[in-house]
Image (spheres, rainbow, N blue to C red):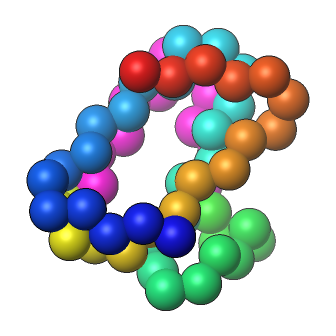
Amino acid sequence: MQQMKIKPNKTVLSGTLHAGRGDTVDKAKSKALPAGSYSVVPGKAHHYVWTTGETDSK
C-alpha cells in the first residue's frame, strides 16, 4: 500500500496492471488496467497495485 502527496499517474504500456484504493489489498475489488490504460490517483489516497504476467508502465 502507498500514500503519496502528489497525484501518481500511470500509463500501462504492456501487460495488465491491477489497481485498487483502500487501506488493505483486496484483489477482488481492484480494477484491471490493460495495455493502453491510463490511471490517476488523487494525492494522499491510499492505494495499491499488482500485476499479472510481465507488465511495463510509466
29 above or below 14? below
The residue at 38%/33% (across/down) is: 10
19 above or below 23? above
Quarter of the rendering containing residue 25: bottom right
Across and down, in percent, residue 35 comes to 59, 19
| 6 relative position to 45: left or right | left
The residue at 61%/19% (across/down) is: 56
Magenta portion: prevailing SS class: strand
The residue at 69%/77% (across/down) is: 26
- Residue lying at the far right in this picture: please name it: 53
Is 48 within the magenta? no
Span highlighted in magenta in the image: 31-41
Is 33 within the magenta? yes
Across and down, in percent, residue 33 comes to 58, 37
| 46 relative position to 22: left or right | left
- Residue lying at the far bottom in this picture: please name it: 23
